[in-house]
Image (spheres, rainbow, N blue to C red):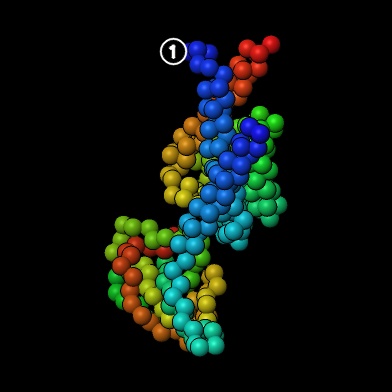
């Protein structure tokens, strides 16, 4: 009976760990997806990193200068005042390594507040 | 104050609590590696030495973590679970230390919020868990020796 209690408590802690893990992972996604009444994706708005080769302090609205990354380690290395990230709206959900143009009909939304250089992850 | 002065029930409760902490850690990180497997695999491919075996490692690591958690949950096998926990955490720590010493880029795909730790914090975090698992094993040994 005592062993059953221990196993039950162990399983409960395990379930809590899995629940906590799901909660943390689900909050990582920052895709804003708009759908029509039939559930088809109309537009996807998300942040893209500016390629280091095209780094500058000015706003860059050239879609080919940006790349989407789904890596958790993707970030902007601070130290410079370059515009590092911008939001784009596309017609498809971008895959890792795609530019806004690859994701279809890119529309520039705004500069993200992040400054620096994309770390390439 | 020596731990031998505490009752057996108290020592068993400490062992059980340590097992629960270890279960939480391994199920949390193991599940997050499986849930976001693509990213974990991608991160491993970037590590020079283990890159060629990334696919194998990306599945075996979370599976071993889950198996060790199951061993820790079952009271009869919790001792083996603790041994497994110490071995795996030691391997992770050796990996991190070697990365800090030799790698130019420092990738960490440990799963979940633990990725937010710096490398030094990560080493201390692992060492603390290894220490409490060793402490639990010593308590198990003490209980066994007092019984005989």
Give the residue at x 36% y 80%.
A109
| Residue A88 appears left or right of A26 | left
Can residue B119 be seen here? The reply is yes
Give the residue at x 46% y 50%.
B113
Comparing A38 with B47, the one in front is A38
Give the residue at x 54% y 69%.
A96
Residue B74, image x, y percentages: 67, 36
Quarter where residue A10 is shown? top right
Q: Name the residue under label 1.
A: B1
Comparing A12 with A89, the one in front is A12
Q: How many marks?
A: 1
| Residue A43 appears left or right of B36 | left
Comparing B130 with B100, the one in front is B130
Residue B148, image x, y percentages: 69, 11
Q: Which chain carries label 1?
A: B
Quarter where residue B130 is shown? top right
Residue B132, image x, y percentages: 52, 29
Comparing B48 with A24, the one in front is A24
Q: Is residue B146 above or below residue A34?
A: above
| Residue B132 appears left or right of B45 | left
Indicate the secondary structure of the residue bearing disc 1: loop
- Tag 1: Cα neighbours inside 10 Å, few (<14), some, or many (≥20)? few
Residue A116, image x, y percentages: 34, 62
Give the residue at x 53% y 17%.
B7
């Amino acid at each position: 009976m005592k062993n059953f209690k221990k196993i039950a408590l162990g399983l409960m802690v395990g379930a809590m760990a899995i629940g906590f893990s799901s909660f943390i992972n689900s909050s990582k996604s920052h895709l804003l997806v708009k759908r029509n009444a039939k559930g088809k994706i109309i537009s996807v708005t998300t942040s893209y990193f500016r390629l280091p080769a095209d780094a500058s302090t000015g706003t860059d609205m050239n879609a080919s200068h940006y790349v989407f990354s789904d890596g958790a380690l993707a970030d902007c290395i601070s130290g410079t005042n370059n515009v590092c990230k911008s939001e784009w709206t596309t017609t498809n959900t971008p895959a890792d390594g795609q530019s806004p143009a690859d994701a279809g009909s890119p529309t520039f939304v705004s500069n993200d507040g992040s400054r620096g250089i994309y770390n390439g992850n | 104050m020596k731990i031998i002065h505490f009752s057996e029930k108290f020592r068993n409760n400490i062992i059980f609590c340590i097992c629960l902490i270890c279960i939480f850690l391994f199920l949390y990180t193991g599940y997050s590696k499986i849930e976001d497997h693509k990213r974990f695999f991608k991160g491993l491919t970037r590590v020079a030495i283990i890159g060629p075996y990334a696919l194998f490692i990306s599945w075996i690591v979370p599976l071993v973590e889950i198996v060790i958690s199951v061993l820790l949950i079952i009271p009869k096998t919790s001792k083996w679970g603790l041994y497994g926990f110490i071995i795996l955490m030691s391997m992770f720590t050796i990996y991190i230390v070697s990365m800090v010493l030799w790698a130019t880029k420092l990738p960490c795909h440990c799963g979940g919020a633990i990725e937010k730790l710096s490398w030094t914090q990560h080493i201390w975090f692992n060492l603390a868990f290894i220490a409490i698992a060793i402490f639990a094993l010593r308590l198990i040994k003490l209980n066994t020796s007092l019984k005989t």
